[in-house]
Image (cartoon, grey):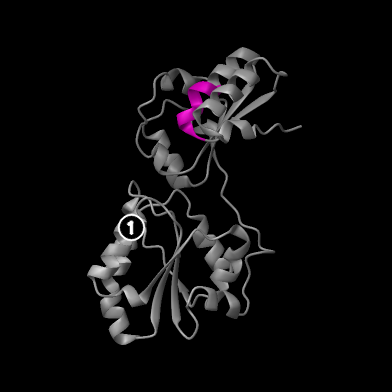
């Protein structure tokens, strides 16, 4: 009984077409909005169909009040909020005119049949040039808007760490518009030989990547939940 609109993920034009289609499509019982920036559109669908409205919140997008036209009216239309952590729930309630009883914590989860301890993957290590190295892994989006992930701090520690452990390599899995700056920083610190920027890693390869690392680090100053921490812990 769930209808997921894939058209809405195809840019702004696709999103607009999806909203128009939903306005004149079959009547839903429940509208699920998975980002607060889209809430005014979800509230429009609720009013059109007199449906219930569920908002899902994650992290940084609700830690401060977003500047969105019609947000107060849209929040008033929300029946329930699912927050992925108590921290994000508290941050939301600090500014949002919502009764606490309408906000529930629903933690994220990982597939424990995929993420579990195991042997290192020799082929994967060869692919990334990590064989015979001690691997310190991070999995994160490399966004200039979210430098709180702590990549800079780990790079700055590497000269000291590699002096003690010459075989150490910092493997960075993820991509984003901050990649070039971080690569240049590694060069400037003289540790380029101890850093591997792996770029985007397919979901199917992630369990083997975690198992092939010796340690995981996410030096973040704030996470809505941090699913990668669960994935790493589940992988041993």
Q: Is residue 123 left or right of residue 177?
A: right
The vertical placement of 78 against 197, above or below, is above
Residue 102, given in percent of the width and then of the height, sits at 54, 31
Residue at 58 percent of width and 14 percent of height: 47
- Identified at 26% across, 64% down, the residue is 185
What residue is rendered at 70% in x and 23% in y? 29
Q: Is residue 198 visible?
A: yes
**Percent x, y of residue 61:** 41, 38
Nearest the viewer among 201 and 115 is 201
Quadrant of res 8: top right
Q: Is residue 134 above or below residue 92?
A: below
Q: Quadrant of the C terminus?
A: bottom right
The part of the chain drawn in magenta is 35-42
Of 214 and 182, nearer the camera is 182
Give the structural element (helix, strand or loop) at label 1.
helix
Q: Is residue 41 magenta?
A: yes
Q: At 54% across and 67% down in the image, what residue appears?
A: 233
Judging by the rendered image, the residue that carries numbered circle 1 is 180
Image coordinates for residue 57, horizontal then vertical, percent: 50, 38
Left or right? Give the position of 151 relative to 224.
left
Mark 1, residues whose alpha carbon is within 10 Å: few (<14), some, or many (≥20)?
few
Q: Is residue 121 visible?
A: no
Place of residue 31 in the rendered image (x, y in percent of width and height, measured from the top left): 62, 26
């Amino acid at each position: 009984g769930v209808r997921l609109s894939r058209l809405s993920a195809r840019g702004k034009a696709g999103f607009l077409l999806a909203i128009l289609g939903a306005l004149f499509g079959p009547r839903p019982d429940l509208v699920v909005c998975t980002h607060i920036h889209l809430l005014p559109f979800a509230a429009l669908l609720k009013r059109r169909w007199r449906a219930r409205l569920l908002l899902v919140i994650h992290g940084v997008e609700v830690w401060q009040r977003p500047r969105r036209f019609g947000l107060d009216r849209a929040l008033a239309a929300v029946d329930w909020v699912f927050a992925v952590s108590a921290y994000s729930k508290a941050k939301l309630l600090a500014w949002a005119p919502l009764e606490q009883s309408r906000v529930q914590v629903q933690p994220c989860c990982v597939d424990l049949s995929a993420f579990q301890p195991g042997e290192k993957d020799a082929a994967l290590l060869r692919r990334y040039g990590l064989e015979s190295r001690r691997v310190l892994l991070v999995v994160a989006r490399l966004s200039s808007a979210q430098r709180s992930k702590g990549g800079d701090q780990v790079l700055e520690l590497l000269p000291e760490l590699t002096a003690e452990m010459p075989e150490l390599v910092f493997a960075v899995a993820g991509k984003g518009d901050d990649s070039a700056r971080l690569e240049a920083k590694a060069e400037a610190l003289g540790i380029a030989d101890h850093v591997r920027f792996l770029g985007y890693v397919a979901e199917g390869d992630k369990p083997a990547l975690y198992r092939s690392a010796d340690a995981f680090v996410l030096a973040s100053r704030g996470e809505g939940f941090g699913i990668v921490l669960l994935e790493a812990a589940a992988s041993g």
